[in-house]
Image: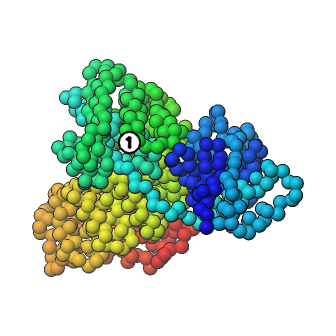
Amino acid sequence: MQNSADNPVRLGEFQIDFASGELRRSGYVVRLKPQPCRVLALLVARPGQTVSREEIQKEVWGGDTFVDFERGLNSCIKQIRAALNDDPDAPRYIETIPRRGYRLIAPVETATPVSAVLQDHAPSISSASSTAAPGSSPFLRRSAVIVALIVVTIAAVTLGVRHSRPEPEKIRLIVLPFTNLSGDAGEDFLGDGLSEEMITQLGELAPQKLGVIARTSAAQYRQTKKSAAEIGKELKVNYVLEGSVRRDGNRVHVTAQLIQTSDQTQLWAATYDRESEDTLAIENDLAHRVARSLALQLLPARESAALAPSTRNSAAHEAYLRGRYALNRMTVEGFRQARVELEKAVQNDQNFALAYSALADTYSLEPWWGGSSPQEAFPRAKQYASKALQLDDSLAEAHTSLGFIRLYYDWDFAAAESEFERAIQLQPGIALAHYWYAGVLSAAGRHEQAIASIQRAQEIDPLSPLINADAGWYYFYARRYDEAVRECRRALEVDPNFGFALNCIMAAHREQGKYDAALADARELFKLRAVQTNQKPEEIVAANAQNGLRSAAELWLVRLDRLSRQAYISPYQSAVLHLWLDQRDQALADLKRARDQRDTLMVLLDVDPRLDSLRADPRFAALRNDIHPSQPSSF
């Protein structure tokens, strides 16, 4: 049987392999998702003709589907143009016909023998196409053949058919925090900001070929003494980009080098000595040099889009770097400092979408650290995330920000999932998008999908204590307690004082009936939190370990009550502790308060094993219906 890869359809400079749904040019390959592929199919089937938006809607979305059609079609066209390296302002492939539709203007050719391709994949189509009316034009015959081939392609892509040869292994790269050589700790933001933006830009260049380790994991190697070979072995990366930055007055001095970890070969080194406002140009130049040095066969359009600066205003850019540096501290004070700087950024550039997205995150994360209540913070967060998307609907970070708000404040699971999927489609290398998407899937009880999503986040950011600990919690909600403990141990290896991970381990041990282990975990938690009580942690012991846990719950409730006078404390946490004490009425009262305050943890009602003793209570059923009004309980 003949291989259809030998008989592609040629579209301008591209070949379409109908066995795999791939576009090929000069050795590189790009795959289109099913929906953009179907849109391209309609255009290829009618070269030179205008295909109306109504026709595309009917054929691809269905005639009765109107929800998000305009947004979906615009997204499909954007993906097709990116794959074809097409410029909408000077098109070579797809021309926009204003208010009507689109037209394929590139030449379309079919390889020979076409009949062999049809026989390989769809004999019935071959027979049908061979019955074209005598005297029909070559154009019509060619269009019929193309339509037949496109149908085969769509079927193959939709059904998940993959080419038989193995996928090439991704190149993996880590960008270490650039060392601040100025001697002024106040300038640390510049090195961190430079490395973080390099991570973002390189992550966008070719996500199917290049995997870039996320900032949190890279930060673990700040001022490391480890060699490139050691880092390569620990993180399984092929290359290390490292450098330094020093600002002297109005000038900035940056050095950088790219090292291959297998033999510690220096592929190149670069030095920049420029005006401070040229930091953006330095970032772009570095990204280009890394791409060239790794000999990546990048799509030029993709490269151009990735390297487009988010702002050209140097003052806005520096304020943004300062704001991100403060935000990454993940403390209440850090959030507040971040807002001050990010507000400066958007004042200097009112079209700075990325800064608005970061502002949204400062507000939506603060309640988790007790800095404000959800009702105080999330409306502001939504305002900024919406502004970011208004300015740039293709900004993955902004969709990620809005998805977080949709889940934890609006309690709208479907909308949150849509935003995260859009973010991942736009930029698959963002660990945060996969991480937060896992939260939606876990809270909805789709545990296998949640675990797959958090594992993807761990691949990108393997040393993040927060991601590893939340991976533990997602296993916990799936009632896979041993794996929950395993993941949280990973988090504690990075940060031994990370109480969020230890709390999950304690909960898992308690659900397993391992009360001695859970009590030992509780003691460690008390030590970490430096709880000031009349009892020392070592004295939280009664007749048996289970009673010792009751004593621990009582002490913890006292602590939460004291803290609630100074900061926002989730009533959900108190509810769990009251259940440990078999105080169901108090627990339900806490959950009602949590509902009224739009508490973020309320999305867990359907999956949290710690609430199982309440599930038969009608009062609990009423509460969960406020969170999941259209979704039946799985219990």
Question: Image check: 38 left or right of 520?
Answer: right
Question: Image check: 222 left or right of 434?
Answer: left
Residue 100 can be seen in this image: yes
> Residue at the spot x=79%, y=54% of the render?
141
Few, some or many C-alpha atoms within 10 Å of disc 1 (few <14, some 14-19, many ≥20)? some
- In this figure, which colouring scheme has been used for the structure? rainbow
Q: Say if 147 sits above or below 474 in the image.
A: above
**Rendering coords of residue 381 (x, y %):** 46, 45
Q: Quadrant of the N terminus?
A: bottom right
Please state which of residues 492 and 531 is positioned toward the viewer in this rendering.
492
Residue 557 can be seen in this image: no
Question: Image check: 378 left or right of 473?
Answer: right
**Rendering coords of residue 275 (x, y %):** 35, 21
**Rendering coords of residue 188 (x, y %):** 26, 34
Residue receiving disc 1: 294
Q: Give the quarter of the image for residue 454.
A: bottom left
Q: Say if 304 sits above or below 553 in the image.
A: above
**Rendering coords of residue 315 (x, y %):** 40, 26
Tell me which amino acid carries mark 1: Leu
Please state which of residues 630 and 626 is positioned toward the viewer in this rendering.
630
> Residue at the spot x=59%, y=62% of the render?
3
Please state which of residues 94 and 581 is positioned toward the viewer in this rendering.
94
Total marks shown come to: 1
Please state which of residues 428 and 492 is positioned toward the viewer in this rendering.
428
Q: Secondary structure at mark 1?
A: loop
> Residue at the spot x=26%, y=21% of the render?
248
Q: Give the quarter of the image for residue 326.
A: top left
> Residue at the spot x=48%, y=42% of the render?
298
Q: Give the quarter of the image for residue 2.
A: bottom right
